[in-house]
Amino acid sequence: MKRKRIPILYTLLPLLLLSCSQESPEPALNVADGGGTLSSHKAYRIEKVGSAALDIQGRIVFWSGNGGNTLLQIALDNTEEAISYKAELIAGTIEERKETLLTLDKIDGSTGAFRSGKFFVVSGSKLFDGLDTYDAHIIISEATESGNIVAMGNIGGNAAPISSAD
Amino acid sequence: MKPTLPLVISLLLCHQLVAQHTIRGVVTAEDNSPLPGVNIVIKGTDQGTITDGNGSYSISTSPNAIIVFSYIGYATQEVAMNGNAEVDLILKEDKSELAELIVVGSRSGGRTKLSTPAPVDVISIKEIMGDMPQMDLAQMLAAVAPSFNAVRSQGGDLNSHVDPAQLRNMAPNQTLLLINGKRRHSAALLIINTAVGSPSTSTDMMMIPTTAIERVEILRDGAAAQYGSDAIAGVINIVLKKGTGEFNGTLTTGGFLNSGGDAPDLTLKGNPDGFNYQLSANYGFDFEEKGYLNLSAELNQRQATVRPYVNDWTAYDDTYLNNERTDKLGNPIITNPELIDAMATGDEAMISNLKTEEGLLAARGYTKGDVTAVYAGQPAITGGTLFYNLGAKISDNLEVYGFGGLSYKYLEGFSCYYRRAAQTDRFDFLLYPNGFRPQITSNQNDISTTLGVKGQLGTFAVDFSNTYGRNSMRFGMINTLNASLGSNSPVDMNLGTHSFSQNSTNLDFSKYYKTILKGFNLAFGMEMRVEQYQIHAGQEESYSLGNAGIVTAPSDDFALIGPDGQPLEDRNGEPIVDASGNPLVLNFGQEYTVKGFSPNCQCFRGFGPDNERNAFRSNISAYLDTELDLSEALLLTAAARLENFSDFGSVVTGKFSARYSLLRNLAFRGSISTGFRAPSLQELNYTHTFTYFVADETGNLVPVDGTTYPTNSTAARAIGIQELSEEKSTSISAGFTTKITPQLELTVDAYQIDVRDRIFNTRTFTAAEVGNNYEEVIGDGEASFFINGADVRSQGLEVVANYKTNLNLSTLTLTLAGTFNKNEILSINVPDLNIANLSDEEITSRYLSRDVEGQFRTGTPREKVIFSALFSRGKFSSMLRSTYYGEVSSRARDLSGPEPNRYYADQTFSAQTVMDLSVTYTPNEHLRFTIGGNNILDSYPDILREENRGFYLYSNYQQGSAGAYYFGRVAITL
């Protein structure tokens, strides 16, 4: 039987060439930190003010953002479609009503939520982390000349959350 | 010679200049008559010439070269020149040279391709593979044989995982594939949508290394009476190499230009892609002239080509941009954290920008195409094959033979639409924040082996053999998820495994009677075949419904409200309330689908336990095949076959053919035959399910299944769908062959093939449409079936002309081959179905839908013409090929447009021409360099009209939409 010498390199070529692996298209994963599901929250009741014409009530929810911010969400029922409402965090209890701590975005009467979007964002986690001792309440008032207060509720250290999760 | 490193460069540097020397002479037969058209080749090279009409030749070569003289019907001779300038030669007749040429279509000693009673194309793969840009067998045959097509799918579920090979625009499973005359098994995959509109199995020709192949014979005629089931359109016989003592190796590399074609705004012009490499080697050992062992190996790696369709679909909807999405418990999902960061800083301009799709894409560094474009294109492939072919003489009258191989192929295909972040039913932020693009993968393993013994038993030639083949395909999905499992879903999944095995045992006898008229060949024999088809389930997550979107009440009076006190929202952001507008209240243990996330693996549901199958079939057949030379001019053949299948009974087929030589160089031929194709085990047993959601009376979203049911299922029987039966065919062909001059051959053949009960698949039927309590059988889902849907006809004309001449020191070979074909649907065979709530017209349109009908009739080119020119002179040779594809037309299944002016978005795609070119330089008998390209002018087919764009941007049934391909090749012979 005749023998033929097979070039040695020829047998090594498969290793050289096929070490190049297939490049599948990678999924598009670029996104800023802080995305995903929020679960850590504390929610407080907002009740109608006795003299208000409409039975406006709902909740304010403080969310611990994944990116280290505090996200506030307001959901009100029975708001008047045609007008906007002001939302403010005021120091002290409802009865004490001290200085304004934080003015939130206006609330759209047609949705009962912030006009600018679902959340009002407070930079940093300090607000959420300190909620249990936060001496404050929330006031909802008509964003009109009269400025009638339509609903309010104690929050933070002044009320037990109606819903919470760590 | 011992090559040094690096191989290619050192071989280039080893080129030697050799003094050229012209040799002349005359070649004659033993009776001193000149032999025109004798092939004269310098051994170990492609350089050569042919003798002219006087038997004369002239060739330039080195003084000590060895010249090989070969001619049909005569013994090949090798002559060492030894410095002589004039060498005359006498060639001796040798009938065995005929037998080596044609195997398919005849069980006699063999005939030349011009003397067969039916048209046969003989393609010398060994000779052409060096010049062709195509690397795998199916694409090579499609480039040289106009009747042969292998439409390479560029996406669409599993369709791109096997290249379906077709003859005469008929289904892939209506062509029988043989290797060395023995039946080859098909792939396990059932391709649901082939180019001719019907489901089909097919043999994956990529499992056979081209370097192992001597030649391919294509019999363009029905031959079921000779070979059994499937041989309706024709038979392809792959003849493996037997050569010994010579090492042949090639390295090929190439890539696609990716210019973007004619749709720059609708696609993404990218950098060249689809780079591929193929390494092949072949060597034969001889056993002291008593036998041979020829070994072949091939390694392939091909990167994907990406031909995106950039659509206008929404990447991020408002709920995504404004962080309005919630989970099943009402917890917010922050999908736009960039917006949250901007709101924390109070930057109003950035806040506005990030609430837009363009702004968020820019912030993440993406274009819209990155997160919406549908990718179609050729799949990525990595694979290898190892083949053997052996023969050994045990005695003067007995020879043992065997052949077979092992093959592996891994493929990643573009099968799926991009799952956009805007599609809430299939979205998970943690896994794929910007959406995802699933891809179907397959791991294909193939093994085959034939062992046989042939020799003389008394006065009969006997051949006894056994052939076993098995193909298995494990399907998977990468970059995917099961949305109903949420973030716990796996992102790569095993969808299941299909396997198909076949074992054939053959016993054949033949005897040639020289004294009966001018010769009579009698052949008879039998075959026993056993087949098995299995479907194994994939992993559970690929076919299950998880609870990521389902709430189970933990107590009585459980109100479906979120932490904000508002009703929970469905996946479209709509509040879930009762008729009074109040949140729904559940009792302990009650379940409610809050978010209708899609179950199963995205894009392709895995095969579940309900889809598992293990089916067997056996069949036994006997045949009689006769060939009678009534005179020197008239040949008559007749064959009959009886075949009995264990699952659907017996079939008898027959064939008559004749060939009459009117003149020495003009012959007429014709045949009439009946044929059949047994439904494959895959068609009989394949079942697959997909799932979607509908709302019940309470508005709750419930999943429902759409299933392809086997025809032996309760679902099929209840509706009146009949069990699949065999397709039956009648074929008629007539034509002539002529050698107009010693250099010019012409064959013209016309054919008509009628197939009764051709298998198609239906559209889906819902339980509501069927009525008659059909929901008790299939639930609220939908059902579809494979059916013997229609009687069809394929007619055509095939013309093949070959011209070969020598011009001084050059050789020119011209080939013009064309096929002109017409497909018709003669009748749609709708049985009496138990469907209460559809009209007869609606039932017919579901049974064989408009688009399927259109795909069969006009979905592939009616005309295909190939012109090629091969020119060689000295150390250089070149190949130019032009392929013309006639126009194709597609028909839409459903109406488009708004009421009241709805219309069918049918489309006709203009004819296309593509050019292939290669140039080869052969510096010496050991080396050969080739560069060239396929579709060198970068021609793209017509773009789909807007209504039909979705997965594809271009028509797929002409040259495809990969664009120009360029390659380089080095071949070594030692």
Image (cartoon, coloured by chain):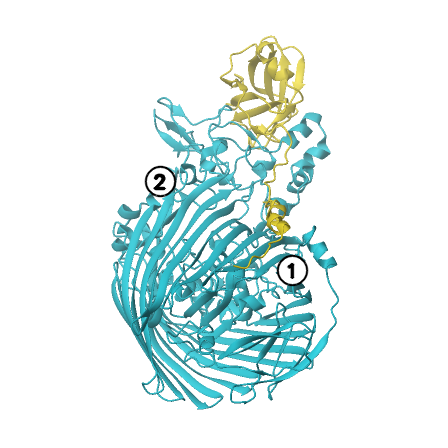
Chain colours: A yellow, B cyan
Q: Chain of mark 2?
A: B
Q: Which residue type carries mark 2?
A: Glu
> Of label 1 and label 2, which has the lower sequence position?
2
Q: Which residue is mark 2?
A: B697
Of B432 and B840, nearer the camera is B432
Q: Residues within 10 Å of mark 2 (few under 14, many from 20)?
A: few
Determine which quarter of the picture holds residue B457. bottom left
Going 67% across and 71% down the picture, which residue do you hit? B877
Determine which quarter of the picture holds residue B925. bottom right
Determine which quarter of the picture holds residue B119. bottom left
Vertically, is B791 above or below B333?
below
Q: Which residue is mark 1?
A: B969
Q: CA distance from mark 1 to mark 2?
A: 66 Å
Vertically, is B801 above or below A68?
below
Kindly state the secondary structure of the residue where label 1 is placed: strand
Vertically, is B263 above or below A98?
below
Taking B19 as reference, is B464 left or right?
A: left
The percent coordinates of residue B793 (x first, y second) are: 39, 73
The percent coordinates of residue B214 (x first, y second) are: 51, 66
